[in-house]
Image (spheres, grey):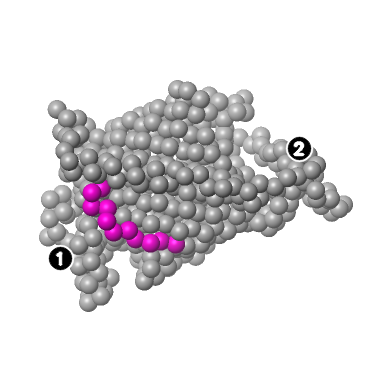
C-alpha cells in the first residue's frame, strides 16, 4: 500500500517528527504588541480610524480628492498597475524587470469578498533570461471559496551546488577554483499550480490541489551531468501531482495582512499513474503570524515553514530555500535536499500616519521592511543540525490599497547581496 509505505513508523522518523513539532512550537509564543489611543473618529472608504490631527484647507482638499478617487476605484471592474525599470542580479545579469498587478471582483454584487488579484513579475536580460511568473488569489461567494494560483515560465541560468551540505561545500571550492560556470546550468521551467479551498467552518478551509510542471536542463558542467542525483533523472521531464490541504486563516487581508494567523498543511503525491515521469510525495507545513505594533501602519510578521519529500524526487523539484518568497539573498538553487525548514521575522513599516494615507499624501504610499531569518536542510528532519543565517531590507510602494510593489535586498553572510522585485509581500 502506498500510504503504509510513506508513513512507516520507526525510531528515526519519530525523532524527525519531534523535531518538526518543536520547530513549529518555537514560533508560537506570542509577541507583545503596542497600541495607541486616539480621540476623534473619521470615516473613510477603507477603514474607520481615529485621529487628533487637525487638517488645514490644503489637506482637506487633498482628503476630498482622495475620497473621490477611492470611490471611483472601489467600483472599477478591473484595476491594473505596472511598475518596472533596469534590473541586475548575478544569475540574470543586466536587464529590464518589473511587475504588473491586476485586481478585480469575480462578482460585482459581492462586496464581502476581497478583490481578486493576479500579479505577474517579469525579467528580460542580456544573457538570455526570460521570466514571466506570479502567484495570485481569486475570491468567490463572500470569501467562502478561494483559488490560489501559482504559475510561471522561466528560462534562465540556474545554480547547482549538489544535494545536501556536503556536496554544497565541495561545490563552493570548485567555484573558487574555476568560477561560477562550474556551478551553473541553463534551466527552462513551466509550472501551473492551482489550489482550490472551501470554507467548511468559520476561518477553517479544506481543499484540493493540482501541480503540473515541466523542466529542461542544458549546458550542465561535467560534474553535474555525472552527479547521481542528476543522472538518475536526465535533463528533461514533467511531473503531475494531486493532493489535499487544510488551512486556518484569520488574516484581515491575503496579500498584505496587518493582523491574523495563517496555518497550512498540505500533502501531494506525484506519479507515473497520473501521467508524470516519476513517483514521489511531498508534505508541507506552514505557520504565519501578523501583529500591528507601535502604530496602525506598522506590522510585525513572522513565519515558519517546512517541506519534506520522499521517494524519487527530481533534482529541480527538491525542497529548497533562497527564492524571492522566503530567505531572500541566498543563491536560488544552491541549498536543496529532501527536506528543509526555515523561519523569518520581518518588520514592515509604511511611512506617515493613517490620516495622511486617507487623504492621499504622496509619501504615505511608501514604506520599508527589514527581516532576519534562518534555514536548514537535510535528507530527513533528523539531519537538521546546521542552520544558515539570512537578513535583508526592502522598499515598498503601494500601487493599490493593500497591494505593494516590493524591492528587496537580502544577504547570505560572506556572499553578495541578492536583489528581488515582485508584487505583494513575500509571505
Residue nearest the observer in this picture, 357 or 277: 357
Please give the residue where the numbered disc 1 appears in the rendered image. Answer: 222
Side (left or right) of 232 relative to 330? left
**Residue at point 66%, 50% (across, down):** 295
Side (left or right) of 183 relative to 228? right
Where does the image place residue 143, in percent across and percent down from the top left?
53, 28
**Residue at point 34%, 35% (across, down):** 266
Q: Quadrant of residue 150?
A: top left
Near mark 1 (Cα within 10 A), the count class, few <14, some 14-19 or many ≥20, is few
Please give the residue where the numbered disc 2 appears in the rendered image. Answer: 43
Asked whether 383 falls inside the magenta stretch, the response is yes
Q: Is residue 99 above or below residue 290?
A: below
Residue 102 visible, this angle = no
Q: Which mark is residue 298?
A: none
Q: Which residues are magenta?
A: 381-391
Asked whether 4 falls inside the magenta stretch, the response is no
Q: Quadrant of residue 19?
A: top left
Amino acid at each position: 500500500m502506498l500510504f503504509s509505505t510513506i508513513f512507516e513508523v520507526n525510531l528515526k522518523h519519530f525523532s524527525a517528527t519531534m523535531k518538526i513539532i518543536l520547530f513549529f512550537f518555537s514560533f508560537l509564543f506570542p509577541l507583545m504588541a503596542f497600541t495607541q489611543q486616539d480621540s476623534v473618529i473619521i470615516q473613510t472608504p477603507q477603514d474607520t480610524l481615529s485621529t487628533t490631527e487637525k487638517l488645514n484647507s490644503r489637506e482637506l482638499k487633498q482628503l476630498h480628492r482622495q475620497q473621490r478617487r477611492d470611490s471611483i476605484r472601489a467600483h472599477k471592474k478591473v484595476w491594473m498597475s505596472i511598475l518596472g525599470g533596469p534590473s541586475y542580479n548575478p544569475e540574470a545579469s543586466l536587464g529590464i524587470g518589473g511587475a504588473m498587478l491586476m485586481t478585480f471582483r469575480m462578482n460585482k454584487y459581492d462586496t464581502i469578498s476581497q478583490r481578486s488579484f493576479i500579479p505577474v513579475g517579469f525579467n528580460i536580460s542580456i544573457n538570455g533570461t526570460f521570466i514571466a511568473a506570479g502567484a495570485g488569489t481569486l475570491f468567490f461567494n463572500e470569501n467562502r471559496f478561494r483559488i490560489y494560483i501559482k504559475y510561471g515560465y522561466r528560462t534562465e541560468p540556474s545554480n547547482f551546488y549538489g544535494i545536501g551540505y556536503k556536496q554544497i561545500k565541495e561545490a563552493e571550492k570548485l567555484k573558487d577554483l574555476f568560477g561560477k560556470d562550474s556551478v551553473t546550468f541553463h534551466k527552462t521551467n513551466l509550472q501551473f499550480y492551482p489550489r482550490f479551498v472551501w470554507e467548511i467552518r468559520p476561518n477553517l478551509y479544506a481543499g484540493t490541489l493540482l501541480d503540473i510542471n515541466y523542466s529542461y536542463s542544458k549546458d550542465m558542467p561535467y560534474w553535474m551531468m555525472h552527479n547521481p542525483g542528476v543522472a538518475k533523472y536526465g535533463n528533461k521531464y514533467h511531473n503531475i501531482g494531486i493532493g489535499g490541504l487544510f488551512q486556518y486563516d484569520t488574516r484581515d487581508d491575503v496579500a498584505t495582512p496587518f493582523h491574523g494567523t495563517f496555518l497550512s498543511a498540505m500533502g501531494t503525491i506525484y506519479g507515473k499513474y497520473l501521467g508524470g515521469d516519476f513517483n514521489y510525495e511531498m508534505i508541507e507545513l506552514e505557520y504565519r503570524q501578523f501583529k500591528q505594533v507601535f502604530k496602525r501602519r506598522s506590522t510585525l510578521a513572522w513565519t515558519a515553514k517546512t517541506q519534506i519529500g520522499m521517494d524519487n524526487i527530481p533534482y529541480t523539484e527538491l525542497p529548497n530555500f533562497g527564492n524571492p518568497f522566503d530567505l531572500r539573498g541566498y543563491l536560488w538553487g544552491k541549498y536543496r535536499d529532501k527536506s528543509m525548514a526555515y523561519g523569518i521575522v520581518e518588520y514592515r513599516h509604511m511611512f506617515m500616519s493613517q490620516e495622511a494615507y486617507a487623504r492621499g499624501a504622496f509619501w504615505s504610499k511608501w514604506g520599508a521592511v527589514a527581516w532576519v531569518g534562518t534555514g536548514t536542510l537535510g535528507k530527513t528532519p533528523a539531519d537538521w543540525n546546521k542552520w544558515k543565517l539570512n537578513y535583508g531590507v526592502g522598499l515598498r510602494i503601494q500601487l493599490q490599497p493593500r497591494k505593494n510593489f516590493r524591492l528587496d535586498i537580502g544577504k547570505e553572510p560572506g556572499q553578495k547581496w541578492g536583489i528581488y522585485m515582485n508584487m505583494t509581500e513575500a509571505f
